[in-house]
Amino acid sequence: MSLKTRTHTAVRNGSEDDLERLVSEEPGAVRHALGLTYHEERGIRTRAARAVALASRRHPVLVQNIIRRLVWAMNDESGTNAATAPEVLQAIADENPELLLPMLPDLVRLSADPELREGLAVVLRTISRRYPGEIGRKLAGSLNERIGS
């Protein structure tokens, strides 16, 4: 069975342990999971985003590269569809928020976009709660300034 098929099966039917095992042992599965974050079924998208987030446990550099690509995709200049990017970023924020810290300025800037505002606000609030010190205060201030509380 191909890695793509195994990834699709794990996202559709597998347990979280199955997903974590697959993306840990097969880093290439993360690419297939990322593709499924554009699926029409919300449940598939959510589980695929969770698979990407789980990969951050063993492959943080890989997931940081995905974060950078998602942030780029949300820029108007990219010309790509980034409608599901906030959902993937939220899954990562729930699992491993420190991976998002280098991209905070971009995420705050992008949160002014009406199409991304709601999803990115959730991501940024998750990060600010996980980092209640200086980062959290600055982020909360920027978030309130940009999009309100």
Image: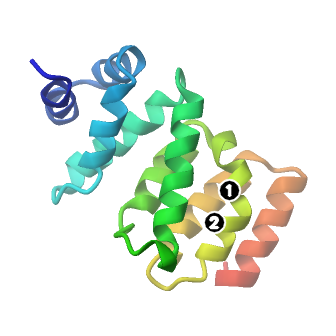
Which x, y percent locates residue 148?
A: 67, 83
Q: Nearer the viewer, residue 41 or 81?
A: 81
Which x, y percent locates residue 90?
A: 50, 52
Q: Is residue 13 left or right of residue 149?
A: left
Residue drawn at point x = 57 percent, y = 47 percent:
93
Residue drawn at point x = 67 percent, y = 78 percent:
149
Q: Quadrant of residue 8?
A: top left
Q: Nearer the viewer, residue 7 or 31?
A: 31
Quadrant in which the N terminus is drawn = top left
Q: Quadrant of residue 25?
A: top left
Q: Secondary structure at mark 2?
A: helix
Residue 118 in the image: above or below residue 137? below
Residue 89 shows in the view: yes
Residue drawn at point x = 77 percent, y = 74 percent:
142
Residue 53 in the image: above or below residue 121? above
Residue drawn at point x = 67 percent, y = 52 percent:
127
Location of mark 2 (residue): 107
Q: Which mark is residue 103?
A: 1
Q: Residues within 10 Å of mark 1 (few under 14, many from 20)?
A: some
Q: Quadrant of residue 14?
A: top left
Give the residue type at disc 2.
Leu
Q: Is residue 50 left or right of residue 99?
A: left
Q: Secondary structure at mark 1?
A: helix
In contact (CB < 8 Å): disc 2 and disc 1: yes
Which x, y percent locates residue 28?
A: 34, 27
Residue 40 in the image: above or below residue 47? below
Which x, y percent locates residue 121?
A: 58, 69
Residue 144 in the image: above or below residue 47? below
| Residue at mark 2 to residue at mark 1: CA–CA distance | 6 Å
